[in-house]
Protein backbone atom coordinates (compact mmCIF):
# COMPACT_ATOMS: atom_id res chain seq x y z
CA UNK A 1 0.00 0.00 0.00
CA UNK A 2 2.83 2.39 0.83
CA UNK A 3 4.49 1.79 -2.55
CA UNK A 4 1.19 2.23 -4.39
CA UNK A 5 0.48 5.52 -2.63
CA UNK A 6 3.86 6.96 -3.60
CA UNK A 7 3.47 5.63 -7.17
CA UNK A 8 0.08 7.35 -7.50
CA UNK A 9 1.47 10.63 -6.19
CA UNK A 10 4.39 10.46 -8.62
CA UNK A 11 1.91 9.80 -11.43
CA UNK A 12 -0.02 12.92 -10.37
CA UNK A 13 3.21 14.95 -10.49
CA UNK A 14 3.97 13.69 -13.99
CA UNK A 15 0.40 14.42 -15.07
CA UNK A 16 0.71 17.99 -13.83
CA UNK A 17 3.93 18.40 -15.77
CA UNK A 18 2.33 17.13 -18.99
CA UNK A 19 -0.74 19.33 -18.44
CA UNK A 20 1.36 22.46 -18.16
CA UNK A 21 3.27 21.39 -21.27
CA UNK A 22 -0.01 20.98 -23.15
CA UNK A 23 -1.25 24.39 -22.04
CA UNK A 24 1.91 25.98 -23.37
CA UNK A 25 2.31 24.16 -26.67
CA UNK A 26 -0.59 21.80 -27.22
CA UNK A 27 0.10 18.14 -28.02
CA UNK A 28 3.58 19.01 -29.26
CA UNK A 29 4.31 20.91 -26.06
CA UNK A 30 3.11 17.96 -24.02
CA UNK A 31 5.48 15.60 -25.83
CA UNK A 32 8.36 18.03 -25.34
CA UNK A 33 7.46 18.25 -21.66
CA UNK A 34 7.50 14.45 -21.42
CA UNK A 35 10.93 14.27 -23.04
CA UNK A 36 12.24 17.00 -20.73
CA UNK A 37 10.83 15.16 -17.70
CA UNK A 38 12.50 11.92 -18.76
CA UNK A 39 15.79 13.71 -19.38
CA UNK A 40 15.70 15.52 -16.04
CA UNK A 41 14.86 12.35 -14.14
CA UNK A 42 17.64 10.44 -15.92
CA UNK A 43 20.11 13.16 -14.97
CA UNK A 44 18.79 13.29 -11.40
CA UNK A 45 19.02 9.50 -11.08
CA UNK A 46 22.75 9.48 -11.81
CA UNK A 47 23.85 12.83 -10.38
CA UNK A 48 21.46 13.93 -7.64
CA UNK A 49 23.69 12.79 -4.77
CA UNK A 50 26.73 14.66 -6.09
CA UNK A 51 24.67 17.79 -6.70
CA UNK A 52 23.08 17.86 -3.24
CA UNK A 53 26.32 17.13 -1.39
CA UNK A 54 28.10 19.83 -3.39
CA UNK A 55 25.36 22.38 -2.70
CA UNK A 56 25.87 21.93 1.03
CA UNK A 57 29.67 21.78 0.97
CA UNK A 58 29.68 18.24 2.37
CA UNK A 59 33.10 16.70 3.04
CA UNK A 60 33.53 12.93 2.90
CA UNK A 61 35.26 11.46 5.95
CA UNK A 62 36.91 8.11 6.55
CA UNK A 63 36.97 5.99 9.68
CA UNK A 64 40.47 7.22 10.35
CA UNK A 65 39.33 10.87 10.26
CA UNK A 66 36.09 10.37 12.24
CA UNK A 67 36.40 6.98 13.93
CA UNK A 68 33.46 7.15 16.33
CA UNK A 69 31.01 8.72 13.90
CA UNK A 70 31.87 6.50 10.94
CA UNK A 71 32.04 3.47 13.21
CA UNK A 72 28.54 4.24 14.50
CA UNK A 73 27.18 4.51 10.94
CA UNK A 74 28.90 1.21 10.06
CA UNK A 75 27.25 -0.54 13.02
CA UNK A 76 23.83 0.89 12.18
CA UNK A 77 24.19 -0.06 8.50
CA UNK A 78 25.02 -3.64 9.50
CA UNK A 79 21.94 -3.75 11.75
CA UNK A 80 19.82 -2.47 8.87
CA UNK A 81 21.35 -5.05 6.50
CA UNK A 82 22.62 -2.28 4.23
CA UNK A 83 25.93 -1.73 2.45
CA UNK A 84 28.16 0.80 4.19
CA UNK A 85 27.22 4.23 2.79
CA UNK A 86 29.66 7.06 2.17
CA UNK A 87 29.78 9.34 5.20
CA UNK A 88 29.94 13.14 4.98
CA UNK A 89 30.18 16.02 7.42
CA UNK A 90 28.74 19.46 6.63
CA UNK A 91 30.37 22.44 8.32
CA UNK A 92 27.38 24.38 9.64
CA UNK A 93 26.31 25.04 13.24
CA UNK A 94 22.66 24.10 12.61
CA UNK A 95 22.03 20.52 13.81
CA UNK A 96 20.66 18.48 10.91
CA UNK A 97 21.29 15.48 8.65
CA UNK A 98 20.16 13.95 5.38
CA UNK A 99 20.66 10.92 3.14
CA UNK A 100 20.98 10.82 -0.62
CA UNK A 101 21.81 8.40 -3.42
CA UNK A 102 19.92 6.48 -6.08
CA UNK A 103 20.00 3.12 -4.26
CA UNK A 104 21.49 1.48 -1.14
CA UNK A 105 24.66 0.52 -3.01
CA UNK A 106 25.32 4.18 -3.92
CA UNK A 107 24.02 5.90 -0.80
CA UNK A 108 25.54 8.68 1.24
CA UNK A 109 24.62 10.04 4.66
CA UNK A 110 25.60 13.48 5.90
CA UNK A 111 25.49 15.12 9.32
CA UNK A 112 26.26 18.71 10.23
CA UNK A 113 28.96 19.68 12.69
CA UNK A 114 26.19 21.31 14.70
CA UNK A 115 24.47 17.95 15.13
CA UNK A 116 27.67 16.15 16.06
CA UNK A 117 28.69 18.80 18.57
CA UNK A 118 25.27 19.14 20.17
CA UNK A 119 24.00 15.56 20.37
CA UNK A 120 24.87 12.60 22.56
CA UNK A 121 25.94 9.31 20.97
CA UNK A 122 22.45 7.87 21.49
CA UNK A 123 20.79 10.83 19.79
CA UNK A 124 23.23 10.69 16.86
CA UNK A 125 22.46 6.97 16.56
CA UNK A 126 18.74 7.75 16.35
CA UNK A 127 19.27 10.42 13.68
CA UNK A 128 21.59 8.33 11.51
CA UNK A 129 19.30 5.30 11.86
CA UNK A 130 16.49 7.50 10.51
CA UNK A 131 18.64 8.46 7.52
CA UNK A 132 19.58 4.84 6.87
CA UNK A 133 15.87 4.00 6.98
CA UNK A 134 15.38 6.43 4.08
CA UNK A 135 18.10 4.57 2.21
CA UNK A 136 16.55 1.19 3.00
CA UNK A 137 13.11 2.37 1.87
CA UNK A 138 14.65 3.97 -1.27
CA UNK A 139 13.08 7.29 -0.31
CA UNK A 140 16.17 9.20 -1.42
CA UNK A 141 15.47 8.48 -5.09
CA UNK A 142 11.75 9.20 -4.77
CA UNK A 143 12.33 12.53 -3.04
CA UNK A 144 14.89 13.57 -5.65
CA UNK A 145 12.54 12.74 -8.53
CA UNK A 146 9.65 14.66 -6.96
CA UNK A 147 11.88 17.68 -6.35
CA UNK A 148 13.06 17.57 -9.97
CA UNK A 149 9.54 17.35 -11.41
CA UNK A 150 8.22 20.02 -9.03
CA UNK A 151 11.00 22.38 -10.10
CA UNK A 152 10.28 21.68 -13.76
CA UNK A 153 6.55 22.34 -13.26
CA UNK A 154 7.39 25.70 -11.74
CA UNK A 155 9.67 26.51 -14.68
CA UNK A 156 7.03 25.61 -17.28
CA UNK A 157 4.35 27.45 -15.33
CA UNK A 158 6.40 30.62 -15.57
CA UNK A 159 6.43 30.25 -19.37
CA UNK A 160 2.65 29.83 -19.42
CA UNK A 161 2.19 32.82 -17.13
CA UNK A 162 4.33 35.20 -19.19
CA UNK A 163 3.49 33.98 -22.68
CA UNK A 164 -0.16 33.03 -22.22
CA UNK A 165 0.19 29.44 -23.33
CA UNK A 166 -1.30 27.63 -26.29
CA UNK A 167 -4.35 29.52 -27.55
CA UNK A 168 -5.79 26.40 -29.20
CA UNK A 169 -6.27 24.59 -25.90
CA UNK A 170 -9.91 24.15 -24.78
CA UNK A 171 -9.52 26.44 -21.77
CA UNK A 172 -7.96 29.29 -23.69
CA UNK A 173 -5.48 31.82 -22.37
CA UNK A 174 -7.32 32.19 -19.05
CA UNK A 175 -7.07 28.43 -18.51
CA UNK A 176 -3.37 28.51 -19.23
CA UNK A 177 -2.86 31.28 -16.69
CA UNK A 178 -4.89 29.40 -14.07
CA UNK A 179 -2.77 26.31 -14.65
CA UNK A 180 0.36 28.45 -14.38
CA UNK A 181 -0.77 29.61 -10.95
CA UNK A 182 -2.29 26.40 -9.60
CA UNK A 183 0.06 23.73 -10.99
CA UNK A 184 3.10 24.71 -8.87
CA UNK A 185 0.89 24.80 -5.77
CA UNK A 186 -0.53 21.37 -6.59
CA UNK A 187 2.98 20.04 -7.21
CA UNK A 188 4.12 21.42 -3.85
CA UNK A 189 1.19 19.74 -2.10
CA UNK A 190 1.99 16.38 -3.73
CA UNK A 191 5.68 16.76 -2.85
CA UNK A 192 4.66 17.60 0.71
CA UNK A 193 2.44 14.50 0.94
CA UNK A 194 5.23 12.21 -0.29
CA UNK A 195 7.81 13.72 2.03
CA UNK A 196 5.60 13.61 5.13
CA UNK A 197 4.63 10.01 4.41
CA UNK A 198 8.31 9.09 4.07
CA UNK A 199 9.31 10.87 7.29
CA UNK A 200 6.87 8.93 9.46
CA UNK A 201 7.97 5.63 7.90
CA UNK A 202 11.66 6.49 8.35
CA UNK A 203 11.06 7.44 12.00
CA UNK A 204 9.51 4.04 12.73
CA UNK A 205 12.12 2.09 10.78
CA UNK A 206 14.95 4.18 12.26
CA UNK A 207 13.70 3.40 15.76
CA UNK A 208 13.88 -0.30 14.93
CA UNK A 209 17.38 0.02 13.49
CA UNK A 210 18.87 1.79 16.51
CA UNK A 211 16.77 -0.25 18.93
CA UNK A 212 15.37 2.61 21.02
CA UNK A 213 12.64 5.00 19.75
CA UNK A 214 13.38 7.45 22.57
CA UNK A 215 16.85 8.21 21.18
CA UNK A 216 15.31 9.53 17.98
CA UNK A 217 12.46 11.26 19.85
CA UNK A 218 14.95 13.12 22.05
CA UNK A 219 17.07 14.00 19.02
CA UNK A 220 14.08 15.38 17.08
CA UNK A 221 13.21 17.73 19.93
CA UNK A 222 16.75 19.09 20.04
CA UNK A 223 16.91 19.31 16.24
CA UNK A 224 13.68 21.31 16.16
CA UNK A 225 15.02 23.78 18.70
CA UNK A 226 18.34 24.12 16.89
CA UNK A 227 16.84 24.57 13.41
CA UNK A 228 14.62 27.38 14.66
CA UNK A 229 17.48 29.13 16.39
CA UNK A 230 20.40 28.66 13.98
CA UNK A 231 20.58 29.54 10.28
CA UNK A 232 21.64 27.06 7.63
CA UNK A 233 22.85 29.38 4.89
CA UNK A 234 23.41 26.67 2.27
CA UNK A 235 19.85 25.41 2.75
CA UNK A 236 18.50 28.96 2.50
CA UNK A 237 20.27 29.28 -0.86
CA UNK A 238 18.93 25.89 -2.02
CA UNK A 239 15.40 25.58 -0.55
CA UNK A 240 14.50 22.79 -3.01
CA UNK A 241 16.69 20.44 -0.96
CA UNK A 242 14.97 21.21 2.36
CA UNK A 243 12.78 18.10 2.18
CA UNK A 244 15.86 15.87 2.28
CA UNK A 245 16.80 16.90 5.84
CA UNK A 246 15.50 15.15 8.94
CA UNK A 247 13.95 18.46 10.10
CA UNK A 248 13.23 21.46 7.95
CA UNK A 249 16.41 23.58 7.78
CA UNK A 250 14.39 26.65 6.79
CA UNK A 251 12.58 26.97 10.13
CA UNK A 252 14.86 29.82 11.12
CA UNK A 253 13.02 32.20 8.77
CA UNK A 254 9.60 30.54 8.69
CA UNK A 255 9.82 30.01 4.93
CA UNK A 256 7.59 26.96 5.21
CA UNK A 257 4.75 28.46 7.21
CA UNK A 258 2.19 27.69 4.48
CA UNK A 259 3.49 24.46 2.94
CA UNK A 260 5.79 22.26 4.99
CA UNK A 261 7.52 19.19 3.59
CA UNK A 262 7.95 17.83 7.12
CA UNK A 263 5.27 16.70 9.57
CA UNK A 264 5.07 18.54 12.87
CA UNK A 265 7.96 17.47 15.08
CA UNK A 266 5.64 17.18 18.08
CA UNK A 267 3.55 14.59 16.19
CA UNK A 268 6.66 12.63 15.21
CA UNK A 269 7.93 12.64 18.79
CA UNK A 270 4.55 11.51 20.09
CA UNK A 271 4.47 8.60 17.63
CA UNK A 272 7.97 7.54 18.67
CA UNK A 273 7.14 7.72 22.37
CA UNK A 274 4.02 5.62 21.73
CA UNK A 275 6.21 3.14 19.87
CA UNK A 276 8.61 3.01 22.82
CA UNK A 277 5.72 2.38 25.22
CA UNK A 278 4.46 -0.45 23.04
CA UNK A 279 7.92 -2.01 22.86
CA UNK A 280 8.65 -1.66 26.56
CA UNK A 281 7.50 -5.19 27.30
CA UNK A 282 9.81 -6.72 24.69
CA UNK A 283 12.59 -8.32 26.71
CA UNK A 284 14.75 -8.57 23.62
CA UNK A 285 14.88 -4.80 23.12
CA UNK A 286 17.75 -4.19 25.52
CA UNK A 287 19.95 -6.76 23.83
CA UNK A 288 19.33 -5.31 20.38
CA UNK A 289 20.29 -1.71 21.07
CA UNK A 290 23.40 0.10 20.00
CA UNK A 291 25.67 0.27 23.07
CA UNK A 292 25.02 3.55 24.86
CA UNK A 293 27.44 5.88 26.56
CA UNK A 294 26.20 4.77 29.95
CA UNK A 295 23.92 7.78 30.41
CA UNK A 296 26.79 10.27 30.35
CA UNK A 297 25.98 13.45 28.46
CA UNK A 298 29.61 14.26 27.66
CA UNK A 299 31.82 14.17 25.78
CA UNK A 300 29.84 15.02 22.67
CA UNK A 301 31.09 15.10 19.11
CA UNK A 302 30.98 11.36 18.33
CA UNK A 303 33.60 11.60 15.57
CA UNK A 304 36.31 11.32 18.20
Image (tube, helix red, strand yellow):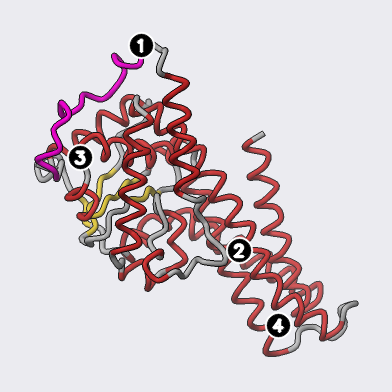
**Which quadrant, please, contains the N terminus?**
top right
Q: Position of residue 95 (x, y in %)?
A: 28, 54
The residue singled out by tag 2 in the image is: 188
Q: Secondary structure at mark 2?
A: helix
Q: Residues within 10 Å of mark 3 (few under 14, many from 20)?
A: many
Is residue 259 part of the magenta span, yes or no?
A: no
Q: Earlier in the sequence, mark 2 or mark 3?
A: 3
Mark 4 vs mark 2, CA separation in Å: 18 Å
Q: Earlier in the sequence, mark 4 or mark 1?
A: 4
Magenta segment boundaries in residue numbering: 285-300
Which residue appears at 37% of the width and 73% of the height? 237
Q: Secondary structure at mark 1?
A: loop
Mark 4 vs mark 1, CA separation in Å: 59 Å
Q: Which mark is residue 284?
A: 1
**Which quadrant, please, contains the C terminus?**
top left
Q: Which mark is residue 160?
A: 4
The residue singled out by tag 3 in the image is: 120
Which residue appears at 71% of the width and 64% of the height? 16
Q: Secondary structure at mark 4?
A: helix
Q: Quadrant of residue 206?
A: top left
Amino acid sequence: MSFMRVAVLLAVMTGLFLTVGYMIGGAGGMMIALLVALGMNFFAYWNSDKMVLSMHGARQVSEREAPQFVGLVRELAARADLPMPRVFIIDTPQPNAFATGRNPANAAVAATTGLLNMMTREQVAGVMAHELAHVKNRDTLTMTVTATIAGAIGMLANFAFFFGGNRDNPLGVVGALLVAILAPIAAMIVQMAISRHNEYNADAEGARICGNPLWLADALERLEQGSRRIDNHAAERNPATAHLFIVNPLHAHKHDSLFSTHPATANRVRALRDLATGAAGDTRAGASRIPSSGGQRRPRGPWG
